[in-house]
C-alpha cells in the first residue's frame, strides 16, 4: 500500500469509528442528542406560536424565520462537531 492510500484508509477508519461512537451516543433519528432535541422541539413550538400572533409589520415573519434558521444552524453544527471533530473543532473548556 502506498503512503497516500494508507492515509486514506486510516482516515476512513477514523471516520467510521467516529460515526459509530456518535450513533451510540445519540438516540434521535435526526442526529441530535436528547438535550439538543429538546431545544429543536422548542424552536418548532416557537414557530407555531409565532404564526398565531397577529402581524404588526410585514417583515416580522421573515425576521423571525431567519432567527430560527440561525438557531437550527447552530444545532446542525453540533452534529458536525461530533462526527468530524478535526474539521469542526470545539473550544469548550
Image: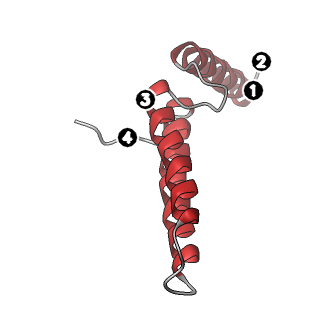
User: Residue 12 at what x, y percent from top left?
Assistant: 69, 24
Query: Closest to the observer: 81 or 39?
Result: 39
| Distance between the alpha carbons at the discs numbered 3 and 1 | 39 Å
Neighbours of disc 3 within 10 Å: few (<14), some (14-19), many (20+): few
Asked if one can make out residue 7 in the rendered structure from this viewpoint, the answer is yes
Residue placed under numbered mark 1 in the picture: 5
The outermost residue toward the left is 93
Residue placed under numbered mark 4 in the picture: 90
Q: Earlier in the sequence, mark 2 or mark 4?
A: 2
- Residue in the image at 55% along x and 34% along y: 84
Neighbours of disc 1 within 10 Å: few (<14), some (14-19), many (20+): few
Neighbours of disc 2 within 10 Å: few (<14), some (14-19), many (20+): few
Q: Earlier in the sequence, mark 3 or mark 4?
A: 3
The outermost residue toward the bottom is 58
- Residue in the image at 48% along x and 65% along y: 67
Residue 6 to residue 81: above or below: above
* Secondary structure type for disc 3: helix
User: Residue 56 at what x, y percent from top left?
Assistant: 49, 84
Residue placed under numbered mark 3 in the picture: 35
Q: Earlier in the sequence, mark 3 or mark 1?
A: 1
Please say if the residues under marks 1 and 2 sit with CB atoms less than 8 Å apart. yes
Residue 67 to residue 27: above or below: below
Q: Quadrant of residue 90?
A: top left
Disc sitting over residue 1 in the figure: 2
User: Residue 40 at what x, y percent from top left?
Assistant: 52, 42
Q: Earlier in the sequence, mark 1 or mark 4?
A: 1
* Secondary structure type for disc 4: loop
Residue 66 to residue 9: above or below: below
Amino acid at each position: 500500500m502506498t503512503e497516500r492510500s494508507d492515509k486514506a484508509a486510516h482516515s476512513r477508519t477514523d471516520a467510521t469509528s467516529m460515526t459509530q461512537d456518535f450513533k451510540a451516543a445519540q438516540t434521535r433519528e435526526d442526529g441530535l442528542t436528547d438535550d439538543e432535541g429538546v431545544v429543536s422541539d422548542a424552536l418548532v413550538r416557537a414557530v407555531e406560536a409565532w404564526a398565531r400572533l397577529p402581524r404588526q409589520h410585514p417583515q416580522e415573519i421573515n425576521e423571525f424565520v431567519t432567527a430560527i434558521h440561525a438557531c437550527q444552524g447552530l444545532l446542525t453544527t453540533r452534529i458536525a462537531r461530533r462526527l468530524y471533530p478535526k474539521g469542526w473543532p470545539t473550544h469548550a473548556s
